[in-house]
Image: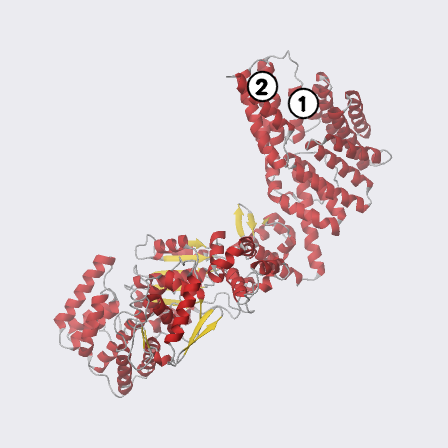
Amino acid sequence: MRIRLLGPVELRAGTDGFVSLPGAQRRAILALLALRLGRVVGVDGFSELLWGDRPPASARAALQGHVAALRKALAGTPFVLHTRSPGYLLDGPADEVDALLFESLTGRAGERAGRGSRAADAEAIALLEQALRLWRGEALADLPDTALRSAAVDQLDQAHSAAVLSWAGLRLRQGSGAAAVPALEQNVRADGLREEMVALLMRCLHQAGRPADALAAYHRARRRLDRELGLRPGPALEAALAEVLSGDRAQDADPAGPATLTAPVSPAGPAVPAVVPRVPRQLPRRPLDVVGRGAEAGWLDRECGPERSGDGLALVVGPAGSGKTTLVASWAHGRAADFPDGQLFADLQGLDPEGPVDPDTALDRFLQALGVAREAVPADRDGRAALYRDRTRGRRLLVVLDDAADADQVADLLPEGPGCATVVTSRGSLEGLVSADGAALLRLEALPEADALRLLEGALGTERLRAEPAAAAELAALCDHLPLALRIAAARLATRPDWTIAELAAELADEGTRLSVLDADGATGVATELRRTFRRLSPTAAELLTLLAVHPGREVDALAGAALLGADAVAARRALGELTAHHLLTGTAPGRYGRTELVRLFSAGLLAEQPEECRRLAWERLVDYYHAALRHCGAYLDPGQEDDDAPVLPLHALPPATDIRTALDWFRAEEPAIRALIDTADSTAPDRAWRLALTCGSLYYGASRFTDWLRCARVGEAAAERCGDPVASALLHVSRAQALVALERRHEAAEVVRKAVDATRSMAGPVAVSARVRALATLGLVTAMTGSAAEADRLAASATALALEAGDRRRLVDALVHQGWVNLAGGDREGAQRRSREARQLLPAVPVTQVHIWSMLTEAQSLPPTVHDQEVDLAWHRLLAACEEAGLLYLHAIAEQSYAGLLLARGREREGTKRLRLALDRFDRHDRLAGFVSEFTGGLEESLKLRSSRSF
């Protein structure tokens, strides 16, 4: 033996016996290398072992120094310490490391014991005794106390306990249980809550002719279980008690065949085959690089820990690559000591291409792990489930069911009794497990940015990350902060030390190759995991996920999904719900669903595999839907829209807008997608681009998005010109001019709208007339702001006359509203009142549109000074209430300012000042949305400062 770990860590380099290496950290490095003999240990693993989660800045240099010293110490031994990216590897014979030799001896003993003959049992006993003699006390006794050291010690201790149980069980079966009593008593003193150990001690004491001591051991365990856990003795202890009370002693096994012990026959049925007590330790390897997730681990403690407040059944769900298995495995290792009867683990392969694991198979494995002989496992699922419940009742077991397909697969794998806890992971929602079995649900999301950067730092080193902080943040974002993607990216950098973080970020920025870069080896990666989820989807959900690549927004609703599918909203809503249940989408608001960039790129890959006709049809359906939806919602702001060629859809296929506010709410949510569609259509289908841009105008105005409106109008204008459609160009000139007016760029607006007036002078047809009416009315408005009042009045009157001549009721409303404002600007209060009322009377009373409210504003502003205060207040309060209800921030701000001015003019200083403050607040909010600072805002600030200075 050259390296001893089962006690203080020691090395025998020469012929002078074992020596303890100087320095606990150096011994820790040797121990970790020896435990992972023949495998590369990353620098992060050493860092976690030596310093936990707080490594010093000099960690890498200190590690290199220890490695250099170890190489000298290992000279003359059969071990060689190599440098292997991303760390180090120790090579040498496994039987020269006591922990590895222990593992080998116990494995060979298990093979012998499985043969069932007396001779084989004797060989197994000898092997186990040889293995147990290797222990010299607590394993890794003199290493730094870190989480990784604790995990390694815990695994070694579990293996030691399992060996003691196997050895004592074989001694009992051989009839020499008395020889096992001292070792069992020592183990029970160390952990008196391990029922298998106590039960085996009772049987050995009974076989040794010490029934009183056996009963005393039982009662000590019973009292402790009750006092510390509130539990009654489980089946193992009760069976041992019955055996002691019966007075029967276990005799030597029949040399002709394997020996079995049977529990006494109960009145309820036949005897159950007894088993050599086993403590299953099935957890997968403990993850070494868990970063963050403290809140989630705390949640698991509350639901499944020893002092839990929940029922001990937890369901952890989340998207591909979010680290569900890593989180649960890490937590389970940390809590393994709280479940002394063992830990069961099953990878249920819910997304495996060949299908999930059959519950029958999982039950068979669990029962054998719990000590049931293979021939004693019932053949049918119901029988296995019943025996599994019996074997787990009264025990303290932790069961981890990873990657479950559905609730039915899990149902029979849930253990029985309050001492057990179960954690299930799944990419699906497993709603049945929550509703029927009361599982507590944890939805695992991507890592916060700080934790994502910590993960990269742990893999790449502090210096490398600090050298490129901006590139690291970009890399984390391109990985959607998903642990799987981050680890793959970090691994690529770790194996390419000459690469910079910025270079990998630039490679990932290419959307066409990002997913392939984040697939480690074709078998592990983001795309691979997403494809596994994709295979589980219904045909409709799979089709929708594919077609969502056409949708340019980060969010989608059921109506847009229905348009993509060419189906109704009910089918789309069902498919969206299924995608959300599989964590391919996330609910962001009622009826709205978001997706990550990696899922979007995965959808794009799926769409690229479809025929061109399929892609084109989906895009056209989506554009047609948005065109119809914009016209539907825009009618609540501008009921006189010209676009009569918009697709006609049934009402149930359109947004459920019922007034201005709900129309604007829909538009605000969908605007990014609509803007992106306009940009895409500008080069591929300009006729669709200009129509979308034109229909957006009134909604941009109502939402106070003036800068975005101007940009959209310019794109539409260029698209209309490419189509060679002069009427469309004129309408878009008007829209751009109106956006410029809203942005208070009035002279630019005048130049643009004159192009529309000139262009429409010789045009014919209803739409051309409509465009000319709008152009004249808008030019009249701009002229009133910048030039001659008489010219403005002439232009506005021309627009009204042309609308009357054409018999166009919608354009007449628009012309009258503009003419009323021009009259007011020119001092004609009576004309302003009359034309505003005429415009409102031409509109239905409901729904109230933006045109109604503009008319009400002009009417209130044009009230003569002789009107009594009560009548004035009534008119203004009605207007302000309409603005508030509609959610029209800009009009509301103007109305507050105008009312404030009127109040101040009438000597109502206190009320007027209050209204000024309200107006300033609304203009501040409006300016942030509009993308510029209005001249009204500055004027209000000066007015309030002046009034404030007067008050002192």
Q: Is residue 917 left or right of residue 180?
A: right
Left or right position of 200 against 449: left
- The part of the image, by quadrant, that contains residue 510 is bottom right
Residue 922 pos. (x, y %): 58, 30
- Check disc 1 and report its element: helix, strand or loop: helix
**Mark 1 burial class by Cα count in 10 Å: few <14, some 14-19, many 20+:** many
Way the structure is coloured = secondary structure
Residue 854 is left or right of residue 538, and the answer is right
- Circle number at residue 874: 2
Disc 2 residue type? Leu
Q: Is residue 422 visible?
A: yes
Dot 2, how many residues are within 10 Å of its Cα: few (below 14), some (14-19), or many (20+)? few
Q: Residue furthest right?
A: 762
Q: Quadrant of residue 523?
A: bottom right
Q: Position of residue 941 (x, y in %)?
A: 58, 25
Closer to us: 408 or 76 = 76
Which residue carries the number 1 mark?
858
Q: Do we see residue 267 in this rendering?
A: no
Residue at the extreme top:
866
Q: CA distance from mark 2 to mark 1?
A: 15 Å
Q: What kind of residue is marked 1?
A: Thr
Is 732 situated above or below 194? above
Q: Nearer the viewer, residue 414 or 877?
A: 877
Give the x, y percent position of residue 200.
22, 73
